[in-house]
Amino acid sequence: MGFIDQIKGELGEAPAPPPKGAGAVQEIVKRYTSEVLFDRLSPEEAGQKAVDEMKSAISS
């Protein structure tokens, strides 16, 4: 009997895959947060640019 067969009763459902663009969105948020924290962009500018970039990442 294989290992997986032995523990089959303890295994649950696999987690759902992350939504399309999720990894890119995290990176976009980090980048624009840094831009605001280092006073390179205003929160409003960073927010608009981040939203535009996230929309593009999700739709591609």
Image: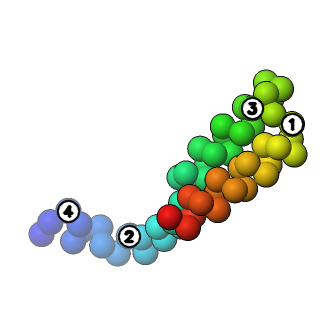
**Residue type indicated by callout 3:** Glu
Using the image as rendered, state which of residue 32 and residue 48 is in the foreground: 48
Circles 1 and 2, Cβ within 8 Å, touching? The answer is no
Q: CA separation, marks 3 and 2? A: 43 Å
Q: Residue at x 14, y 66 (%)?
A: 2
Q: CA separation, marks 4 and 3? A: 49 Å
Q: Position of residue 51 (x, y in %)?
A: 72, 56
Q: CA separation, marks 3 and 1? A: 8 Å
Q: Residue at x 38, y 70 (%)?
A: 11
| The quarter of the displayed image where residue 36 is located | top right
Mark earlier in primary sequence (4, 3): 4
Left or right: 52, with 15 as reference point: right
Q: Give the label on residue 3, or none.
A: 4
Residue bearing mark 3: 35
Mark earlier in primary sequence (3, 1): 3
Residue 54 against residue 41 in the figure, above or below: below
- Element type at marker 4? helix
Residue bearing mark 1: 42
Q: Residue at x 73, y 48 (%)?
A: 49
Mark earlier in primary sequence (4, 1): 4
- Element type at marker 2? loop
Q: Residue furthest top?
A: 38
Q: Give the label on residue 11, or none.
A: 2
Q: CA separation, marks 1 and 2? A: 48 Å
Q: Residues within 10 Å of mark 4 (few under 14, many from 20)?
A: few
Q: Position of residue 48 (x, y in %)?
A: 79, 51
